[in-house]
Image (spheres, helix red, strand yellow):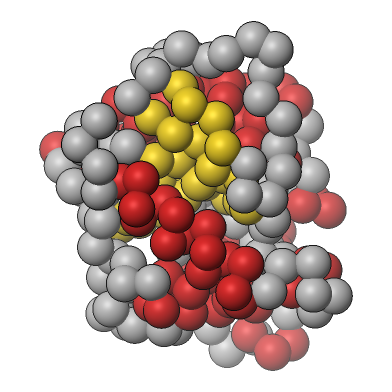
Amino acid sequence: MRALVQIEREIIVCRMCPRLVAWRERTAAEKVPRFADQEYWGKPVPGFGDAAARVLLVGLAPAANGANRTGRVFTGDRSGDFLYAALHRTGFANRATSVSREDGVRLTGAYLTAVNRCAPPGNRPTPVERDACLPFLAREVQALADLRVVVALGAFAWDGALRALRESAPVPRPKPRFGHAAEARLGSLTLLGCFHPSQQNTFTGKLTEPMLDAVLSRAADLASRTS
């Protein structure tokens, strides 16, 4: 727990990537009309969840008017709505919606994070920006002592997770390929792939509620095993 708190403190004050700092702060200052009356977080977004988590879910980056506004990963946008509902259905979350850092949502057995901690223009971090943030993810993996399963939400998260996991687990060669419900064994950890719960995927049916529930249920099953 202490290690995760320290990581969170360092994330919140990070200013390593000038382009991302400028974008997140500009978005927080200008706002969109529907959130004009709200105070934006406007800082890097730390991970959130259970320090005893056996399942880690990794996304791409905060949404400009989602987590960049609320300060909690996957909170305040449609992707988060879809994800938290699934976490609730599968027993990881005490509530089906997450709207702010003070809404009482708790995760049990799961921890949510992202490859990049600042909202990127066009939702596209550069490789340099990705690599600058990866040490935070690697440290979170190491701090979660009970971790057994990493769920990568999308191909970017899959690649980022593999890069971060090199610090603590053997990554097979050739590198495992991303796919929905793909699985890769990395020492004591299992990496699971899942399509990202973006509107592009959920509105078109590429990712459905049963598909996401199945991945999370598989993660819970793997996490419950002792070896």
- Residue drawn 62% across and 49% down? 181
On-image quarter of the N terminus: top left
- Residue drawn 56% across and 37% down? 183
Residue 36: x, y in percent? 65, 85
Q: Quadrant of residue 201?
A: bottom right
How many numbered marks, from 0 up?
A: 0
Q: Is residue 213 left or right of residue 102?
A: right
Q: Is residue 167 left or right of residue 2?
A: right
Residue 39: x, y in percent? 51, 76
- Residue drawn 68% across and 57% down? 196
Residue 34: x, y in percent? 69, 89
Question: Which one is nearer the viewer's eye here, 175 or 198?
Answer: 175
Q: Is residue 66 above or below residue 85?
A: above
Q: Is residue 172 above or below residue 161?
A: above
Question: Which one is nearer the viewer's eye here, 188 or 117?
Answer: 188
Q: Quadrant of residue 25?
A: bottom right
Residue 50: x, y in percent? 24, 55
Q: Is residue 111 left or right of residue 108?
A: right
Question: Which one is nearer the viewer's eye here, 17 or 106?
Answer: 106
Q: Residue 196: in sight, yes or no?
A: yes
- Residue drawn 63% across and 85% down? 35
